[in-house]
Amino acid sequence: MSELLDSLVRASVRSVAPYVPGTTVEQARRRFGLERVVKLSSNENPLGTSPRAMAAIRELETLHIYVDDDYRAVRSLIAQRAGDGVALENVLLGHGSNELLAQLFITFTEPGDQVVMADPTFSLYRMDARLHGVEAVEVPLRDGVHDLDAMLSAVGAKTKMVIICDPNNPTGTQVEPEAFARFVQALPERVILVLDQAYREYMTAGVEGITYAMNRPQTIVLRTASKIYGLAAVRFGYAIAQKDMIDWLLRTRLPFNVSAPALAAVTAALGDDDFLRQSVAANVAGRAQLTAGFTQLGLTMYPSAANFVAVAVPMSATIAYEGLLKQGVIVRSGDGLRMPQRLRVTIGTQLENATFLAALTAVLASEAPR
């Protein structure tokens, strides 16, 4: 790189490495000459995309006209389905929930502020903090779960935000509602509470983030269409908060940040309750299948409330990941997720899960002491 250009880059940007996504199917095929690859690394819906959403995208006739930038129809639909008194004015849309997360840092944080978060948790929290000159105060998980008491103790005079990922990525664990209620009660009102619930639809019970957002000022909940609705490729997320917070965030929102295909797909997907039920049922069955398989192999995993599991392996996570990759199964190594000796595995179809378990059995056998 050019030394002159390096000197022009913000110091906070120089301290951040580019985001590294999981291995793609095409990369695995090229590297090992594989014909069939099972991808269980990005927490995508194994059933695919809502059929109604796909039909809505196919029905689009033009793409040369800008969309209506206030997105009233979709915001109203989200508000209606959310309940808890949510109105159109309480909903903000984004190009994925990651964009909304970045907006929170842009809108509310100053260099020198602190943001309290778990460790490990979703890596973009730490990245956004560094990019904006904010100190990430990272509190270790306890048994794979947010340690809310320790996070509360970490809140100080410089704390601007606390971020809770529920269910947590990469562990899949959820926060207990009673413990969360006590945490919120004790959290100073001046601290912004961010509840990232990208996987909330997979939870059979748990914290109702929208209720907190509508009842506690300085609280916001993030959701996405990428996971259970199978719309990762169109990029759509939304936030729910009280109107004052949404109004401030609108000042930092990029115009036309949600595309026409995304709006059409999400509008249709939100009404596809059959696909939602099928996705939840498939996830419950797949989680049970993996749990039974791990038990048979003598492995343990964190209790998962999401569409992925974090399983402990008796070796380097990267060695296990590479061994699986050679057999055409892509997972995520916990070494890159601050979760050593664990693999993060998306819950797939019954066939995909069986393929993964068979490959894992072979890897364990090949690495066993002789």
Image (tube, rainbow, N blue to C red):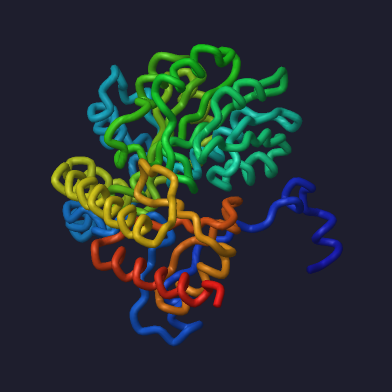
- Which residue is located at x 49 percent, y 38 percent? 100
Q: Quadrant of residue 208?
A: top left
Q: Seen from this angle, which residue lies furthest left?
A: 274
Is residue 304 shown left or right of residue 11? left
State how many labels appear: 0
Quadrant of the drawing holding the C terminus: bottom right
The residue positioned 36% from the left and 44% from the top of the image is 306
**In the visual, does 83 lie left or right of 236?**
left
* Residue 317 visible to an observer of this rendering: yes
Q: Quadrant of residue 156?
A: top right
Q: Is residue 115 above or below residue 351?
A: above
Q: Position of residue 43 (x, y in %)?
A: 39, 54
Of 58 and 138, nearer the camera is: 138
Q: Tell which of 228 and 181 is nearer to you.
A: 181
- The percent coordinates of residue 369 (x first, y second) are 56, 73
Q: Residue at x 66, y 24 (%)?
A: 154
| 101 sits to left or right of 3 | left
Residue 252: x, y in percent? 55, 34
- Outermost residue, front direction? 370
- Determine whether, in the image, residue 108 is placed left or right of residue 226: right
**Relative height, residue 222 to residue 266 (above, below):** above
Q: Image height check: is 155 above or below 227?
A: above
Q: Nearer the viewer, residue 97 or 337?
A: 337
Give x and y (percent) for residue 1: 78, 68
Q: Is residue 30 above or below residue 15?
A: below
Q: Residue at x 23, y 30 (%)?
A: 81
Q: Is residue 44 visible?
A: no
